[in-house]
Amino acid sequence: MRLLDPDSAGRSNVRILSISADCIELSSPISVLLGTHVQLRRESSFLLGEVRRCRAVGGNFQIAVDVKDAFLTHWAAPFHPGLEVARSAKV
């Protein structure tokens, strides 16, 4: 997780607790302020989102991130199933 707040250069390894259509629950060793924009990177994709909840749970923090957008990295895009449809639509 990378914090996109101009006042912070924070990065943290997080663990995914749950995923739904528009929200991801994370476990993080650092606290994050509500409203902070974050970038989550995993394998061939990354997500942009906004922190909606952060609460202390044990020695970590449980963070709810509303997903705003998702992207594939440039090297994974050719394998995306929707790419061929997009190419044929441009012709």
Image (cartoon, rainbow, N blue to C red):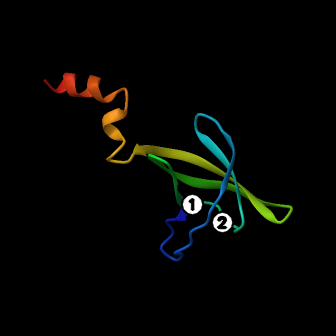
Identify the element where label 1 is drawn: loop
Q: Quadrant of residue 70?
A: top left
In this rendering, position of residue 91 left or right of residue 79 = left
> Looking at this rendering, what residue extends furthest in the right direction?
58
Q: Quadrant of residue 57?
A: bottom right
Cβ–Cβ under 8 Å for marks 2 and 1: yes
Q: Position of residue 11 (x, y in %)?
A: 56, 68
Quarter of the figure that contains the N terminus: bottom right
Q: From what the image shows, is residue 59 above or below residue 46? A: below
Q: Position of residue 26 (x, y in %)?
A: 68, 52
Q: From what the image shows, is residue 30 above or below residue 88? A: below
Label annotation for residue 1: 1
Question: Residue at left 13%, top 23%?
Answer: 91
In this rendering, position of residue 54 left or right of residue 37 = right
Q: Quadrant of residue 88?
A: top left
The residue identified by callout 2 is: 32
Query: From mark 2 to mark 1, how far is it between C-alphas?
Result: 11 Å
Q: How many marks?
A: 2
Task: Check disc 1 and give the amino acid type.
Answer: Met
